[in-house]
Structure formats: C-alpha cells, structure tokens
Image (cartoon, rainbow, N blue to C red):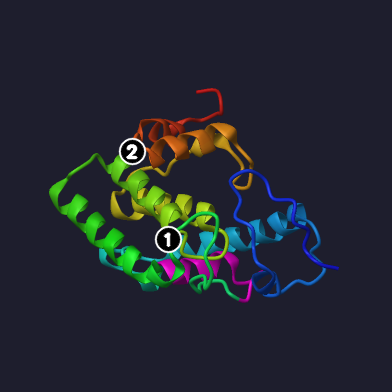
C-alpha cells in the first residue's frame, strides 16, 4: 500500500524517495495524510504559543527548519530538511539556502525602513517562501503560518484569517491571488489573507 498520486491544483507532487519518508505506512490517501498532518500542525501551534520569537530568530534558516520539523515531523522523516530535487515550482534545489538568506536580508531591510505596511511585509515574505519552496511539501501551510507568526510575534498584531479556509482546502480564490502576487500584484493576496470568508 502506498500514497496515491491524486494531487489537486496548487499541490506539489512528491517523488518516490520523498514518499518513502512517510512515517505512518498505513496512510493511503491524501485525505488521510491531511488529517495526520493537521494534528501535527496543531501540536506545532502549541509550541509556537510558548516560544518567544524576535525578528532575528524569525528571519533565520534555523527557525524555518525548526518550524517545518515541528509542523510535519510526526508524519515525514524529511521534515525540517531542505528538498534535494527540483519540483514543478521553486528555485533550483541547490540554491535554497542562498535564496532564503536573500529573503531574510530583504525582510530585515523592509522592517528597518518601513518599506511596506506590516501586512504587506508579512504577505511578501509568505509569497517568497512559497516561491523558493524550501521543503519537499508543506510550503504553503508553512508560509501562511510564518506570516501569522510575523504578525503576532514581530508586529504584535492579530493573525490573518485567510478567508476562513481550512488550511488544506483547495481554494481557487487563494490560488488566483497567489498567481497575481507572482506577477507583482500583492493586493488580492493581502485582501484574501484578511477576509473572513471566501466571498471577497
């Protein structure tokens, strides 16, 4: 029994070696996988609530790896480890660490110079994490959680509502907003992140 390959739009397919990293061998469908991952993510949220996070810690390779491991470590052996293959999205896998360092440096600059609003800084950061795609899977959920952590821990503001969506929902409006951000227009993604329902 192995994990099926019924990927939805916006999901990154795993290669066979990455699928071998599944710790719970009885998982056969993406629905089952989502349920186990969601339980793991809820445990990570509990860990985050207790953790003091400065902008220096937040904007580090150490933290992004640690958070991914906390979110997915009960399900995947490779949780918290950068991918070692190229995907249908993301930078060349060998440049992940370099591209993340550029993102962290850019974000420090945005923070120091108030280049954008706090909401836009968090959303631009989230978008770049997905663009880089550091891990084999879970990058969208990781990036949304990091945007929330930035709002709550760095800016001391309420977290985003993300359209009231379940974190695993295939949401066309969300994907459309991501693709607008790919073209440099962040307004739809900011609007979506602050909306309480999908009818925005």
Looking at the picture, does residue 5 appear above or below residue 81?
A: above
The residue labelled by disc 2 is 184
**Where in the figure is residue 136, as x and y percent of width and height?**
56, 65
Looking at the picture, does residue 112 appear above or below residue 80?
A: above
Q: Which residues are magenta?
A: 64-77
Circle nearer the N terminus (2, 1): 1
Q: Secondary structure at mark 1?
A: loop
The residue labelled by disc 1 is 91
* Mark 2 crowd level (few <14, some 14–19, many ≥20, 10 Å Cα): few
- Residue 73 covered by magenta stretch: yes
**Where in the figure is residue 148, as x and y percent of width and height?**
42, 49
Query: For the point 13% across and 49% down, which residue is it?
Result: 113
When asked about the image quadrant of residue 36, the answer is: bottom right
**Where in the figure is residue 25, as x and y percent of width and height?**
79, 72
Magenta stretch: dominant secondary structure: helix
Q: From mark 2 to mark 1, how far is it between C-alphas?
A: 17 Å
């Amino acid at each position: 029994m192995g994990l099926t390959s019924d990927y939805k739009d916006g999901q990154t397919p795993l290669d066979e070696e990455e699928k071998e990293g599944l710790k719970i061998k009885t998982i056969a469908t993406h629905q089952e996988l989502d349920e186990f991952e969601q339980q793991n993510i809820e445990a990570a949220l509990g860990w985050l609530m207790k953790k003091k996070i400065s902008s220096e810690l937040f904007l580090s390779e150490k933290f992004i790896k640690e958070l991914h491991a906390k979110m997915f470590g009960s399900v995947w052996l490779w949780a918290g480890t950068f991918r070692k293959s190229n995907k249908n999205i993301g930078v060349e896998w060998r440049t992940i660490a370099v591209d993340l360092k550029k993102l962290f440096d850019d974000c420090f600059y945005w923070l120091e110079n108030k280049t954008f609003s706090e909401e836009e800084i968090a959303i631009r950061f989230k978008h770049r994490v997905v663009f880089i795609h550091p891990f084999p899977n879970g990058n969208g959920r990781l990036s949304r959680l990091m945007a929330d952590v930035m709002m709550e821990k760095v800016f001391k503001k309420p977290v985003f509502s993300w359209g009231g969506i379940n974190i695993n929902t295939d949401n066309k409006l969300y994907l459309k907003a991501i693709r607008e951000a790919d073209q440099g227009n962040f307004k739809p993604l900011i609007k979506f992140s602050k909306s309480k329902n999908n009818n925005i």
